[in-house]
Image (tube, helix red, strand yellow):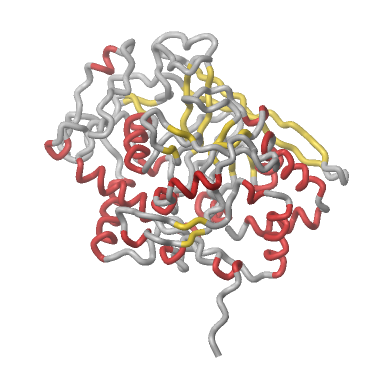
Amino acid sequence: MPLLPPEPYEREAFSGGETTNILAVGSLAFTFPANNLDRDNERRFFSGNAFFNQAWVASPSTTTARDGVGPLFHARSCSVCHFRDGRGEAPEDGELITEGIVKLGLPGGAPDPIYGDQLQPFAIDGFDGEALPRVRWVEEPGTYPDGTPYSLRRPELTLEEPFYGPFADPLQTGIRMAPIMVGLGLLEAIRVEDLEALADPNDSDGDGVSGRIRRLEDGRVGRFGWRAGAPDLVAQTANAFNGDMGLLTNVRLDNPCTDAQTECLDAPQGINDGDTSEVGERIFEAIVIYMRTLAVPARRSVDDPEVLMGRTLVEDIGCVNCHAQTLITGDSPIPALVGQRIYPYTDLLLHDLGPDLADGHIEGDVEPGEWRTPPLWGAGLVDDVNGHQHFLHDGRARGFEEAILWHGGEAAQSRDAFMDLSSEERALVIRFLETL
């Protein structure tokens, strides 16, 4: 008798298709290579892992591979923000942002004339960081229709001790916490035509959801970053080296120091591996391969009756209109990633989530309330890996429930439907999300 095909929920146990690592649990759940990597790419994965976690130093230095950081920077290594390849933790009340960044700009979208488009709080010896980003949280209480109380928190950012002069007035800012790193190569391999099929910029079907593709200035499709500002992992990696660590790559040789920061512009640059950039091509390529091949952990308890009821509720209240369950990968430089049926719970599109989540920072043609749908795979393991459940772009949500309650705009219908559920049904939705 032939075997019956697995039920959809059974297939979803392998969130990353054949790349899924079924052993990826606990505090190291996000650190494993794709399960089906060939030996050569697995070797490159571990090489990239070493560079991802090593700290860069100031130039000149005795090292010829990791010098040139700064002189202004946010972090000395990739893993400062992406600890164990996981999600950045929002600061406690009154503390500094350390596992995320602060975007800067004028109301029209231009960068701050002195500080540029991203804050660099720290500096190498002999220099001073730009300013200290500190967050205080304001509680906003609310009540479900059934009378159950809840409280949300909203961040209030202050930039203390600006060293190079006053910030622009008015200044638009945006907090961006570091996202989970798993499955990025699979998302990079999603075909553009499949994203176009998911997009509905004019809400032609009348369901209230109008996700759109972000087309970058060069015509490519943005798919990485909180506002889909990078088209691929090469660009995303170069942007992070440049903006977060003050390091030049062959992809981005523009100095992150502004014209007003003359001492920064005159600082010595690294010459790693004899390359003209500060990040040698060998290191850059290793880190890109590492990012492409981090395995998605397998889902847990997919056949649990309560999880299945939560899954049905997630579909019924419309979460999957943006958090698309199933995608299939196309071409990739990594053969192991090609043709995989995956369950990332994202459409990689921009959606307007309303004024409550709009931070006013302008990025290209993206409206203040628009955000790229983040993938949900791995979200249920953030607490195991990073010891917190701080979600959304600025980490304001303390768990799945608060994240849902902050949704507005196109997601308001789903949020309201969640609020109208019974407390037992709401718990089932959360139970399902905890298995992702």
Residue sticking out furthest to the bottom: 1
Q: Is residue 284 left or right of residue 412?
A: left
Residue 388 x, y percent position in the rendering: 57, 47
Question: Image check: 373 left or right of 110?
Answer: right
Q: Residue furthest front?
A: 204
Q: Which residue is drawn at the image coordinates 75% and 38% (left, top)? A: 151
Q: How far across and down, in percent of the image, does residue 254 sit?
A: 28, 24
Q: Is residue 160 above or below residue 334?
A: above
User: On the rendered structure, is 235 left or right of 181?
Assistant: left
Residue at left offset 43%, top offset 44%: 82
Quarter of image, res 10: bottom right
Q: Position of residue 175 (x, y in %)?
A: 53, 30
Residue 174 placement (x, y as % from top left): 53, 26
Is 302 located above or below residue 124 in the figure? Answer: below
The quarter of the displayed image where residue 351 is located: top right
Asked if residue 84 shows in the view, the reply is no
Query: Is residue 309 among the parts visible in the rendering?
Result: yes
Q: Quadrant of the C terminus?
A: bottom right
318 in relation to 224, above or below = below
Residue at (51% x, 22% y) in the render: 362
Farthest-out residue, left: 274
Please name the residue shown 69% across and 46% down the image. Answer: 401
Front residue of 229 and 359: 229
